[in-house]
């Protein structure tokens, strides 16, 4: 992979400010068009990410910062470099989801500067053989178009579970472990096992470890090739496997892969891409498309969950020192009730036009009173089945009273773990506390399951905690009735074994929560901070 471009010299420009401005406008426009074209080629979530990057490139605030530096006599390259660096520092200081967008800014800056210099932007090499890619980070534009016949796994030193590298890796079913601090120190040609299910990269694996990894990969490939059947525990207890969707466009694939309905449809996509709330008509069209794909099947829709890492100016523009504990979820909707009423109107109209079994739930419900408020309002609008998400300890501890008012509940293990353990789930430094199998979290889940049985109300579970625990636990053993899978797709490409390390040398990062496919390969590296390519270990082929 090409070296990142060095910082431009901080010298006065020999061109006029007008000439440099014209050069910047041309370069920025070309980069934006290239990102949009890559997005159109990749499709899916990648298209959304790259279109957002294209908008970032042409952001008026960035343009103003660049122009101000050009007016001071700086070169186009230096003005772009400094302006983007300033914005990057701002995002990094914000941390969490927004902090992880700083890497996207870096990529745009590199592409614009490369265009100004007339050189190729840094990108992924093509060594002509399968390899494992190890890098400081990887740009969304490069991740989106990775050749999956050649890139067997991806390891980065930076990034987190919500970085666009991780998001797109999940979208493309790439074995990926991010946040491995010393990954770029791996020696060229070294054999490794990358186990993204555990978030571990193992160097110098023993023969036994290699054999175990190959056996796991073979078992996974066999399971992926097996006919799809309704979800159930080993003892035959049915646990419907429901899709976790963020856009109606994903419904067709979920149906093709055997989803038995939708356990969580996140409606934020309609709101996050707009400067104002979508109309009832726009929402109705999206919900109708979703419901029409699941005739006769259950579809659980969560009303808008904004706030925290998903701020919306038209919903809540107040500055909050700790937005995760501020106006988010149902609290934000109550403060802007017109938005909630319009969403319920659109959902009721879409329900009337289709034959799906629509269930609607509110996010971040903390009290019995909030439960009563939402369920009563939803029923007023004709929603027949109204429930809540249990994501905070208070509602879990009061689950019997909550379920006495609600028709159902869904346990969101990601936020429930975050609030129980007092650990930001987007902050890498406290990632070790993000354990949905911690006894405190399991006790709360058990309370909710018991309340569901006592009241006869359905309880679902979604998030990372819905998967099997290291100790072999299962969602059904906590009393949940169904499992919501955010990655409902068989591992058709699971022929590559996992990369794993002896535990004494294991380098732990953040694996994709849905990644159970693994790959063993040797590595071939570039300089510090750049991807290393790992040629295929012929003996490990399946």
Image (cartoon, grey):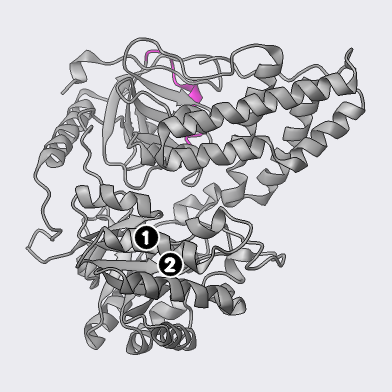
- In the picture of the structure, the residue carrying the numbered disc 1 is 436
Regarding residue 156, the answer to whether it shows in the image is: no
Q: Which residues are magenta?
A: 179-189
Indicate which label's residue lies in the foreground, 1 or 2. Answer: 2
Apparent side of residue 280 relative to residue 82 in the rendered image (left or right): left
First-in-chain label (1 vs 2):
2
Element assignment for label 2:
helix
Few, some or many C-alpha atoms within 10 Å of disc 1 (few <14, some 14-19, many ≥20)?
Answer: many
Q: Where's residue 296, x and y in %?
A: 19, 68
Q: What's the residue at 88%, 14% (across, down)?
A: 15
Q: Where's residue 89, x and y in %?
A: 72, 41
Asked if residue 136 is positioned above or below residue 4 in the image, the reply reads: below
Q: Which sits in the foreground, 470 or 74?
A: 74
Q: Which sits in the foreground, 52 or 238?
A: 52
Q: Where's residue 41, x and y in %?
A: 43, 30
Asked if residue 388 is positioned above or below residue 192 in the image, the reply reads: below
- In the picture of the structure, the residue carrying the numbered disc 2 is 416
Residue farthest toward the right in the current orientation of the protein: 72
Regarding residue 241, the answer to whether it shows in the image is: yes
Element assignment for label 1:
loop
The image quarter containing residue 361 is: bottom left
Apparent side of residue 187 relative to residue 232 in the rendered image (left or right): right
Q: What's the residue at 68%, 36% (across, down)?
A: 58
Apparent side of residue 53 relative to residue 355 in the rendered image (left or right): right
Q: Are marks 1 and 2 in contact (CB under 8 Å)?
A: yes
Which quarter shows the C terminus?
top left
Asked if residue 67 is positioned above or below residue 439 in the image, the reply reads: above
Q: Which sits in the foreground, 459 or 72?
A: 72
Q: Is residue 180 magenta?
A: yes
Q: Where's residue 448, x and y in %?
A: 32, 77
Q: What's the residue at 47%, 35% (across, down)?
A: 180
């Amino acid at each position: 992979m090409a070296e990142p471009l060095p910082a431009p010299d901080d010298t006065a420009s020999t061109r006029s400010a007008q000439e440099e401005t014209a050069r910047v406008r041309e370069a920025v426009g070309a980069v934006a068009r290239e990102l949009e074209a890559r997005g159109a080629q990749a499709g899916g979530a990648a298209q959304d990410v790259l279109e957002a990057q294209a908008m970032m490139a042409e952001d008026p605030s960035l343009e103003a910062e660049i122009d101000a530096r050009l007016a001071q006599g700086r070169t186009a390259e230096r003005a772009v470099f400094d302006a983007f660096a300033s914005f990057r520092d701002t995002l990094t200081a914000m941390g969490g989801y927004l902090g992880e967008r700083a890497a996207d800014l870096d990529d745009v800056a590199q592409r614009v500067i490369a265009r100004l210099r007339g050189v190729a932007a840094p990108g992924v090499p093509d060594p002509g053989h399968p390899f494992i890619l190890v890098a400081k980070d990887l740009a969304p534009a490069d991740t989106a178009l990775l050749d999956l016949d050649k890139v067997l796994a991806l390891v980065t030193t930076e990034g987190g579970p919500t970085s666009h590298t991780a998001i797109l890796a999940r979208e493309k079913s790439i074995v990926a472990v991010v946040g491995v601090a010393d990954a770029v120190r791996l020696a060229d040609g070294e054999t490794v096992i990358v186990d993204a299910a555990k978030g571990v990269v193992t160097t110098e694996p023993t023969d036994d470890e290699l054999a175990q990894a190959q056996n796991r990969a073979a078992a996974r490939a066999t399971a992926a090739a097996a006919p799809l059947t309704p979800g159930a525990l080993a003892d035959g207890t049915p646990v419907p496997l429901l899709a976790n969707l963020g856009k109606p466009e994903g419904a067709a694939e979920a149906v093709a892969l055997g989803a038995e309905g939708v356990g969580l449809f996140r409606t934020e996509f309609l709101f996050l891409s707009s400067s104002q709330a979508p109309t009832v008509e726009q929402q109705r069209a999206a919900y109708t498309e979703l419901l029409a794909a699941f005739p006769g099947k259950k579809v659980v829709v969560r009303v808008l969950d904004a706030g925290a890492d998903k701020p919306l100016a038209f919903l809540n523009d107040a500055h909050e020192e700790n937005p995760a504990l501020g106006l988010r979820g149902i609290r934000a909707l109550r403060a802007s009730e017109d938005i909630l009423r319009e969403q319920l109107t659109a959902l009721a109209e879409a329900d009337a036009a289709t034959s799906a079994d629509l269930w609607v739930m509110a996010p971040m419900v903390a009290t019995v009173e909030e439960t009563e408020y939402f369920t009563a309002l939803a029923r007023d609008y004709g929603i027949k089945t109204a429930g809540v998400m249990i994501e905070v300890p208070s509602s879990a501890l009061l689950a019997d009273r909550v379920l006495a008012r609600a028709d159902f509940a869904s346990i969101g293990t990601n936020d429930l773990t975050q609030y129980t353990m007092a650990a930001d789930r987007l902050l890498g430094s406290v990632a070790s506390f993000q354990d949905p199998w911690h006894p405190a979290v399991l006790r709360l889940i058990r309370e909710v399951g018991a309340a569901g049985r006592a009241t006869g109300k359905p309880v679902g579970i979604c998030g990372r905690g819905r998967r099997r625990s290291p100790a072999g636990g299962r969602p059904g053993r906590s009393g949940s009735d169904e499992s919501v899978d955010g990655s409902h797709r068989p591992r058709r490409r699971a022929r590559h074994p996992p990369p794993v390390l002896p535990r004494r040398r294991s380098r732990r990062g953040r694996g994709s929560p849905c990644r159970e496919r693994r790959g063993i390969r040797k590595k071939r590296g570039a300089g510090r901070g750049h991807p290393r390519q790992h040629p295929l270990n012929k003996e490990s082929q399946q």
